[in-house]
């Protein structure tokens, strides 16, 4: 009598081998997904260990969850591509161009392309690009700009020519707007003649009529002594 082959047993062995193989794969790749720790992010992305997430590579900006390449003079951000420092768009969507900087001659705000210096401050018919301000700390102190907050809107004003120039006598200040040499303490050129028009003092600088010197001078507010002019001078308020 012939014995039939146990097909069920063979099937069980075959299935057992398959499940064993799948078990090995599952142990190596949890949830059955292939994973490469060195390539965990998408196209043009890199993994930021500090943020613990994927970010766009340098030169790419994030737009609708996709990293898109930035154009010339642009830097990538989490909201697309912005102009690099020193560059600005002349209009929305336009290519970034080198921004016009502080002090550029202008006749209206539209000529001041740099968002940082977007205000055209007019002095008569001529003007220059600068920025709005509330205090002089908002201005470029390295160039001695100071905040004129006496008007409706504060604006950073540039100093008169020659101001701060080293001098021994007023002859060293000749040809400058700041044509008086304060030769006793600071030995620097200062603007004089503000008694008749204190507004010629730039920014928040104040006007002191100093009789012992025979003139009135524009000086920085921190040069006042407990709110009084040095040398027994008289403080001339703006508007008088």
Image (cartoon, rainbow, N blue to C red):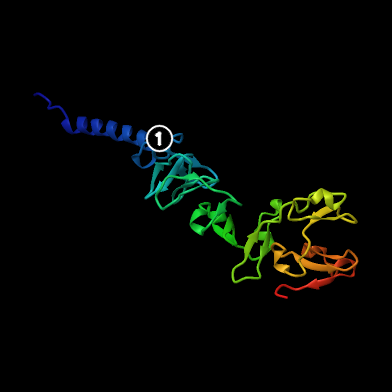
Residue sitting at x 71%, y 56%: 160
Q: Is residue 29 left or right of residue 15?
A: right
Q: Is there any visible trace of residue 227 in the rendered image?
A: no
| 128, above or below 39, in the image | below
- Relative image position of residue 214 (x, y in whole percent): 87, 65
Q: Which residue is label 1 attached to? A: 28
The percent coordinates of residue 130 (x first, y second) are 59, 56
Query: Is 98 displayed left or right of 148 in the figure?
Result: left
Q: Residue at x 61, y 52 (%)?
A: 103
Quadrant (top left/top right/bottom left/bottom right) for the N terminus: top left
Looking at this view, is 68 or 104 the one in front? 104
Q: In this orientation, does residue 143 appear?
A: yes
- Secondary element under disc 1, as helix, strand or loop, is helix
Q: Residue furthest left?
A: 1
Residue in the foreground of this view, choosing between 67 and 225: 225
Q: Residue at x 12, y 26 (%)?
A: 3
Residue most extreme to the bottom: 240
Return the x and y of residue 187 as percentages of the image width and height. Answer: 86, 52
């Amino acid at each position: 009598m012939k014995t039939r082959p146990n097909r069920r047993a063979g099937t069980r062995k075959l299935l057992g081998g398959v499940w064993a193989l799948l078990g090995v794969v599952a142990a190596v790749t949890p949830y059955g997904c292939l994973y490469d720790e060195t390539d965990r992010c998408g196209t043009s992305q890199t993994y930021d260990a500090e943020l613990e997430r994927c970010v766009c590579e340098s030169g790419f900006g994030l737009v609708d969850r996709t990293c898109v390449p930035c154009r010339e003079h642009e830097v990538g951000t989490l909201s697309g591509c912005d102009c690099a420092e020193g560059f600005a768009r002349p209009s929305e969507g336009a290519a970034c161009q080198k921004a016009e900087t502080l002090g550029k001659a202008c006749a209206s705000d539209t000529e001041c392309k740099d968002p940082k210096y977007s205000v055209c401050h007019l002095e008569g018919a001529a003007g220059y690009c600068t920025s709005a301000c509330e205090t002089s700390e908002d201005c470029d102190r390295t160039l001695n700009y100071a905040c004129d907050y006496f008007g409706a809107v504060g604006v950073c004003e540039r100093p008169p020519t020659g101001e701060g120039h080293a001098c021994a006598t007023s002859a060293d200040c000749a040809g400058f707007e700041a044509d008086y040499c304060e030769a006793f303490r600071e030995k620097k050129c200062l603007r004089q003649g503000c008694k008749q028009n204190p507004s010629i003092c730039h920014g928040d600088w104040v006007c002191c009529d100093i009789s012992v010197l025979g003139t009135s001078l524009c000086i920085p507010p921190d040069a006042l002594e407990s709110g009084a002019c040095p040398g027994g001078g008289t403080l001339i308020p703006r508007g008088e």
